[in-house]
Amino acid sequence: MIYFVPTPIGNLEDISLRSLRVLQESDIIACEDTRTTKKLLDHYDIKAQLISYHKFNEFSRIEEIISLSNEEKQISVVSDAGMPGISDPGNILINALIENNIKYTVLPGASAFTTALVLSGFDNTQFTFLGFIPSKSGERNRFIDSIKNRNETLIFYETPHRLVKTLEQFAKVIPNRRIAVVREISKIYEEILIFEASDYENVDIKEKGEFVILVDKNEEIIEITDEYILEKLKEEIQNGKTKKTAVKEISKELDISKNRVYNLSIEI
């Protein structure tokens, strides 16, 4: 049997009794960083064989985990913090277990992005977790630009050294949206900062620790109907732009298909 066991995201006491029991009963614990997991196990005097399982060895290690499972070993899979399978290789392993018809279960527990959402007080009737913001410049710019027309609350993970750059880009793309920066969840220096994106330079942000960034629901978003697009087209053409240029610029501005705008332009 393979167990996916959530671990504390900060305070070592934030772990369930069932999670501790499963870890104690495990023959093998697969973890991202054996040093990090050993601190947790030592704290609770848990003895088990540790093997590394991370993005650099995930495919070779999956075969080993499946082989150990077939030997009827009890295996636990953990991440450095929080729910395994969220922003780590756990999801790939689960799909491999499904394909090989191997029994597994996931224990409920902490996840940084859901905790941050509740801490922020932002709208939670509809939200999207988008994982880590891309690090490569072009991909990153497209990613951040794409959020301007999204209505729901958005949640991201970000590294300390890219945090200010991200906030700077948010200020340009979504200046009127509320931002929450949640730092060091459940640790001694836990901190929540809430501000308008355009005001980020006036906020004292410590660029240390682990961060979750949230963008609040957009109350002002305009529904992009065909009628709205047609009005935009007519306005641009009346201002002297060619139909081809208007189609290109409107599709980019509204982040919608160029074909959709072109098909509507035929009516003009």
Image (spheres, rainbow, N blue to C red):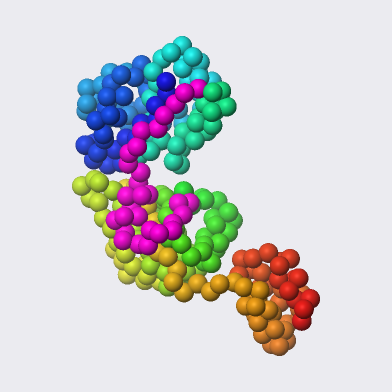
Tell whether 52 sits left or right of 224: left
Q: Residue furthest top?
A: 71
Whether residue 131 is situated above or below residue 37 in the rendered picture: below
The part of the chain drawn in magenta is 102-130
Q: Position of residue 105 (x, y in %)?
A: 41, 29
Q: From the viewer's perspective, is residue 99 above or below residue 125? A: above
Membership of 140 in magenta stretch: no
Point 64% across, 65% down: residue: 256
The answer to which image quadrant residue 60 occupies is top right
Where is the N terminus found, in terms of image quarters? top left
Q: Is residue 243 above or below residue 200?
A: below
Judge by depth and name the residue closer to the eye, 7 or 123. 123
Position above or below: 209 against 4: below
* Residue 215 drawn at (x, y percent): 41, 62
Tally the numbered discs.
0
Location of residue 13 in the rendering, given as x and y in whole percent from the top left corner: 21, 37
Left or right: 175, with 195 as reference point: right
